[in-house]
Image (cartoon, helix red, strand yellow):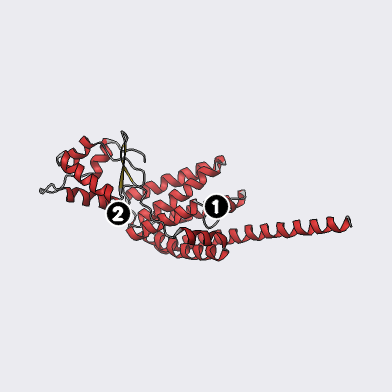
Amino acid sequence: MESQSAETASDLFARVSHGRTADEVVRQIELLLLEGVLRDGDRLPGERELSKRFDVSRPILREALKELEARGLLVSRQGGGTYVADIIGQVFSTPVLDLIARHQRATIDYLEYRRALEGITAELAAQRATDYDRQVLRGILDDMRTAHASGRLEDELAADVDLHGAIGEAAHNIILLHTLRSCYRLLEQGIFFHRHLVFASDEARGRLLAQHEAIGAAILAGQPAIAKAAAEAHIDYIAGAIRDAERSGEWQRISHLRMRHRHAANNE
């Protein structure tokens, strides 16, 4: 969401208490960030609109925004407004990421970690999802089906991340939410494995769609145990698909070496 309408802004930014201090404005925006309502890249309403919504003077608002910028939560662009900064934390340092990218053990451990995380998140989402959360999930599942039917792989991959993110929001646990967002950032960057490997065939894409639908259906039906099991089965399938893809790649490498060896032997 690159910008917000005045109507949306009126829902997000409520009038602060009678003290009307910059600290109160800071606290309200911080909560919106912490709860995942405001996300990286979101543009805040203009100064006039925002001061009106908070019912504070523009000097107080400027003081609050300046404090949030100093904390690295907001960024100002010359002539372009104020935006939410990229606040998804880097889970690992660059040297550790380099190590992870070179060793298969990290991928196995990452998937084991995600299996536990995705399971409890789906379970909580089935227990806590609001009507709005369910509406969002249905919309993303529809987008995923459309992308799958039309063969748009990149759109399907994007919907995959959107769905898991929406499930994280529906769990209504802020620590889980931000941890998951960090995990998905690493996934999108291909740190652990290339997601295209998992979507390598029409059969695999069909299975993944069915798995996502099963997770979504359990959450929408308010079935925590089934949602957890479906989420864990989904990660188990991904782990198996990656092992198969890597094994296939290793077989191709060995076959290539054998062919070169035979060719060299025939030329002796």
Location of residue 107 in the rendering, given as x and y in whole percent from the top left corner = 54, 62
Helix, strand or loop status at disc 2: helix
Q: Quadrant of the N terminus?
A: top left
Location of residue 80 in the rendering, given as x and y in whole percent from the top left corner = 32, 35
Q: Residues within 10 Å of mark 1 (few under 14, many from 20)?
A: some
Q: Residues within 10 Å of mark 2 (few under 14, many from 20)?
A: some
Side of 191 where 257 appears, left or right: right
| Residue displayed at 84% across by 56% down | 264
Identify the mark at residue 154; answer none if there is no mark: none
Identify the mark at residue 195; answer none if there is no mark: 1
Q: Quadrant of the C terminus?
A: bottom right
Count numbered badges in the picture: 2
Q: CA distance from mark 1 to mark 2?
A: 28 Å
Which residue is situated farthest in the top direction here? 79
Res. 125 visible in picture? no
What amino acid does circle 1 point to? Arg
Identify the mark at residue 34; answer none if there is no mark: 2
What amino acid does circle 2 point to? Leu
Quarter-of-image position of residue 221? bottom left
| Residue displayed at 53% across by 58% down | 192
